[in-house]
Amino acid sequence: MKILEFLERAVSLRRRHAPPIPKLDASESKSLRQIFEANDREALQILFRRGLFVGLDRACKLFHPLDLNRLIDSGLLSEENRGIKSHFQAQLYNDLIFLSDFFRWESDQDFVLPIGPAGKYLALLTIRRQVESTLDLGCGCGIQSLLAARHSKRVIATDINPRALALTRFNAELNDIHNIETHHGSYFEPVKGQYFDLIVANLPYVITPEKRLVYRTVDQPGDASTHERLKEIPAYLKEGGFAQILINWVHEKNQDPSEPIRHTIEGGNVNAWLIHNASKQPLEYARMWVKHGNRSYPRKLQKTEQNWLRWYRGHHIEQIALGAITLQRRSSQRSWFCSATVNRMLEGAAGDQLLRLFAGQDYLDRMANPEFLLNEIFTLVESDFSGTEKLPVAYTRHGLRFELSISAVSKAVLQKLDGKITFEKAIQAVSRNSGMEAKQIQYEVLETFVDLLKLGMICPQAA
């Protein structure tokens, strides 16, 4: 027993811990921000992106007028063999500067993830209307908090990792942002009894048997954690408020991927728009995550894959879906659920587009009969056409890249929409030009127009 304790102690002593968060005063933070914005980009890349050394003389010039010794004492930098090295990675995103950890600290429980594809995806999806209050659930280095601070009077950032909260505070000060509060705790524990206009959440969502990387792995078997969060969220939203969360979830091989999520949020007093990006078979999903950190160890990679697949089989997991969901609290009316598969990259911010999706579905929900659309004036919104003359495809140019196969006559009607004439008059104009009867055109295109409304590709003036 004593030998075992000795070995455990030896391992713990060898373990490298992520560095403490730097401590700078307001004037030093301002100077550092100016250095990032207007100085030697090559040296900054070497130090803060690649994690390599810069010569002492060059570092002195780079950080002028800041005292280099002061930056070393603060914990931002270290000196070794007449060279200067950064303890932290730095990224520029959306005119903001974010410090986070290098991946060499990834195995540490306090590791704070740099901004990656998932964080950027959520940032582009986020609805950016002006609000009183925003909750950033699982803030990490603070990307969602700092972006939300631009359109929120008050932002609360929560995380189970105290070091992530400290880094969010540091990044807020570095960017001269002062309307963010940080609260330590798991999920909604720190904000019991509070309500928000916006909730953004990039929580751990990887469905895996491992618990090695806290920042990405769920804390319950399978996708139970995802379903639990979706049930909890409405209780923390103000009426009309939105919640946006990245999720992975399980579905059966021959099942509509949206069905398990639809079932979870039924009766939750929320409208929902689910974006399904893709579904992966267990082996494909495992390889997507297992290869991270194991590329140089083929045997370990193969063994880990086998362990994951054995676990998936034991839990009867057939397909794992990737996507994001936007919820809106609407307890005063019948709730609805929409979903679509979007397997193309986001093309710019999608927040305004999501507002159109919710407005369009609300509008359709008020319609007793689709024929009421005939008297409305519509505009084609940020959409265009591809495909052939006989088999055209309508698609959105920006944001979520929806695509919808339509008929040639539907395209002709859409091209008549100019925000001035009604849907019915557009049909009549096409009828005159084509020789087709207006009733036949109406019958052919009405269902297509409902689908286009759901996808925000046309917008009624009355919405």
Image (tube, rainbow, N blue to C red):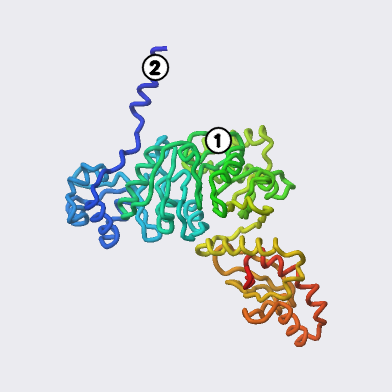
Of the pair 445 and 13, the residue shown nearer to us? 445
Identify which residue, 290 or 193, lies in the foreground.
193
Assign the C terminus to one quadrant of the image. Answer: bottom right
Q: Position of residue 72 (x, y in %)?
A: 22, 44
Identify whether 454 is placed above or below 75.
below
Q: Is residue 289 visible?
A: yes
- For the point 71% across and 79% down, the residue is 412
Kind of element beneath mark 2: helix
The image quadrant that residue 206 belongs to is top right
Which is in the foreground here, disc 1 or disc 2?
2
Q: Seen in the image, is 149 located left or right of residue 227?
A: left
Q: CA distance from mark 1 to mark 2?
A: 28 Å
- Specify the amino acid type for callout 1: Thr
Q: Secondary structure at mark 1?
A: helix
Q: Residue at x 69, y 79 (%)?
A: 422
Q: Position of residue 228 (x, y in %)?
A: 60, 39
Other-residue count near label 2 (Cα within 10 Å), few / some / many at <14 / 14–19 / ≥20: few
Disc sitting over residue 304 in the figure: 1
| Residue of label 2 | 5
Please state if 126 lies on the left or on the right of 174 as rendered.
right
